[in-house]
């Protein structure tokens, strides 16, 4: 049992040494590719969903006090579609779809450095009460917006790998 554990430890050590020798850079972490995300300012619209997206992006990127040369601008579109119709022909379940178009601009630049589109969705049941229905819809929007923010952050982190070409 002990020789097997020793062999596994040696293999793991050789694997990590090999990754560092080939130029592997972690995406997240202190010295990772995504470390520069905290210097990106975030601009969104003025609606509640825009504010929630901005908060999710700032939290995910750690960019609360960003002062770098880049600005992320995002435009959010939210739609709600009924898809669970009961025997009484009343929708009992809805899907909230979020589409975010984003562009990353360098300070003083007119053209975006990189851009993308992110789609996400979440669903919710409609309870009988009005307050419950509004709360369910808001919760679904927040879940979809958080997922969209995570996808934007991932796309930005991937784009940061080619940052030398910016």
Image: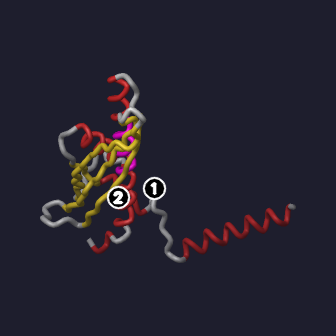
Compared with residue 10, is residue 36 higher up or lower down, i.e. above or below? above
> What's the residue at 60%, 74% (across, down)?
18
Task: Give whichever of 14, 135 is nearer the camera.
Answer: 135
Residue labelled with disc 1:
30
> What's the residue at 34%, 35% (across, down)?
137
Compared with residue 44, is residue 71 higher up or lower down, i.e. above or below? below
Q: Is the magenta stretch mostly helix, strand or loop?
A: helix
Task: Give whichever of 92, 45 is nearer the camera.
Answer: 92
Give the distance between the C-alpha atoms of the residues marked 1 and 2, in whole angstroms: 10 Å
Magenta span covers which residues? 139-149
Task: Give whichever of 110, 12 is nearer the camera.
Answer: 110
The image position of residue 103, as x and y in percent, is 23, 60
Secondary structure of the residue carrying tag 2 is: helix
The image position of residue 49, as x and y in percent, is 26, 41
Task: Decide whether residue 29 is among the magenta residues.
Answer: no
Residue labelled with disc 2:
36
The image position of residue 13, as x and y in percent, is 67, 67
The image position of residue 151, as x and y in percent, is 38, 55
């Amino acid at each position: 049992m002990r020789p097997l554990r020793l062999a596994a430890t040696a293999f793991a050590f050789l694997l990590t040494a090999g990754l560092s020798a080939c130029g592997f850079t972690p995406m997240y972490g202190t010295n990772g590719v995504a470390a520069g995300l905290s210097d990106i300012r975030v601009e969104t619209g003025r609606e509640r969903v825009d504010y929630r997206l901005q908060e999710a992006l700032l939290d995910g990127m750690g960019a609360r006090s960003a002062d770098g040369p880049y600005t992320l601008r995002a435009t959010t579109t939210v739609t709600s579609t009924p898809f669970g119709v009961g025997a009484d022909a009343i929708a009992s379940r809805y899907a909230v779809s979020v589409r975010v178009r984003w562009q990353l601009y360098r300070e003083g630049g007119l053209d975006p450095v990189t851009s993308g589109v992110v789609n996400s969705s979440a669903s919710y049941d409609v309870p009988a009460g009005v307050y419950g229905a509004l709360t369910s819809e808001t919760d679904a929007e927040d879940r979809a917006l958080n997922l969209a923010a995570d996808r934007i952050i991932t796309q930005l982190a991937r784009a940061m790998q080619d940052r030398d070409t910016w």
